[in-house]
């Protein structure tokens, strides 16, 4: 569960080598230096031109949008080793969501044309991109099913569990993950309210399943906690 193991590989594709500067990199990919972005800054906004694909080297990024009433809907929290903005290579002309850092973040950026070149020239890269898009569709369907059929407690537990699978570490107290989101943002992710999130997190702590503060959440009993998600 450690974030050090979270870089995505497929066959012989190393995304760090593809997206970020390396010694002896092939000139035709014109690799750009990592961009350092402060917490809370936007990487792109809704309706921006979809002309680049991004790779997270360090940090975390929130992908979100707004309802017609102006309420935020958080679609995903992405971690080191993950790609976003990939629909740029499948004909999307503009973004339909926005990307914002939730902590200080380093990203590597390739243009649409550079990614298309990688898909053509690097063995397995096109397969990876196709698989990534498919996984994002499955994730969206899973989120919709969760919103329709699971209660608030299960949805909040599922958010914590899913984040623990992406980036966490074992400690003496259990499985600890960074708490990137405020209670309101967790509500925006899980389709609940801020008050409901606060109440349920406190209930889970009273039950001895988790502990938390503003920066971290620790799952103290993973076996029991997983039962809330099923």
Image (cartoon, grey):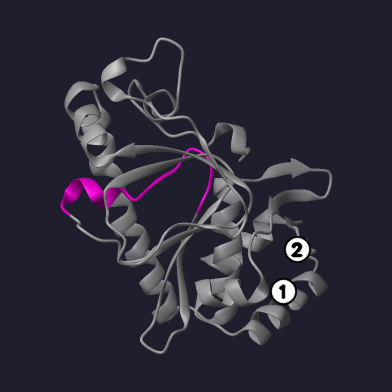
Residue behind mark 2: 210
Does the stretch in magenta take in 85? yes
Residue behind mark 1: 201
Label 2 sits on a secondary structure element that is: strand
Q: Position of residue 61 (x, y in %)?
A: 52, 54
Quarter-wise, where is residue 75 in the image? Answer: bottom left
Going from N to C along the chain, the mark reached first, 2 or 1, is 1
Left or right of residue 30: residue 116? left
Q: On screen, 202 above or below 1?
A: below
Q: Position of residue 25 (x, y in %)?
A: 37, 15
- Whether pointer 2 and pointer 1 mark residues with C-beta atoms closer than 8 Å, the reply is yes
Does the stretch in magenta take in 93? no
Label 1 sits on a secondary structure element that is: helix
Q: On screen, 145 above or below 127?
A: below
Q: Residue at x 66, y 70 (%)?
A: 182
Left or right of residue 91: residue 94? right
Q: Residue at x 59, y 85 (%)?
A: 193
In the image, the segment drawn in magenta is: 78-91
């Amino acid at each position: 569960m450690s974030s050090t193991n979270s870089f995505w590989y497929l066959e012989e594709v190393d995304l760090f080598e593809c997206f970020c500067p390396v010694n002896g990199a092939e000139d035709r990919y014109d690799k750009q230096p990592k961009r350092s972005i402060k917490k809370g800054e936007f990487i792109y906004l809704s309706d921006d031109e979809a002309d680049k694909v991004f790779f997270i080297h360090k940090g975390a990024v929130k992908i979100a949008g707004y309802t017609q009433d102006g309420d935020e809907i958080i679609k995903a929290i992405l971690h080191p080793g993950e790609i976003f903005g990939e629909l740029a290579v499948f004909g999307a002309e503009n973004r339909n969501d926005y990307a914002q850092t939730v902590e200080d973040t380093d990203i590597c950026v390739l243009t649409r044309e550079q990614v298309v070149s990688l898909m053509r020239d690097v063995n397995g890269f096109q397969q990876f991109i196709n698989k990534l898009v498919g996984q994002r569709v499955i994730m969206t369907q899973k989120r919709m099913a969760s919103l329709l059929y699971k209660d608030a407690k299960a949805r909040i537990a599922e958010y914590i569990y899913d984040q623990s699978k992406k980036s966490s570490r074992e400690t003496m107290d259990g499985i600890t993950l960074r708490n990137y989101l405020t209670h309101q943002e967790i509500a925006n992710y899980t389709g609940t309210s801020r008050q409901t999130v606060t109440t349920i997190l406190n209930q889970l702590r009273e039950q001895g399943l988790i502990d938390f503060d503003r920066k971290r959440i620790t799952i103290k009993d993973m076996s029991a906690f997983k039962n809330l998600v099923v």
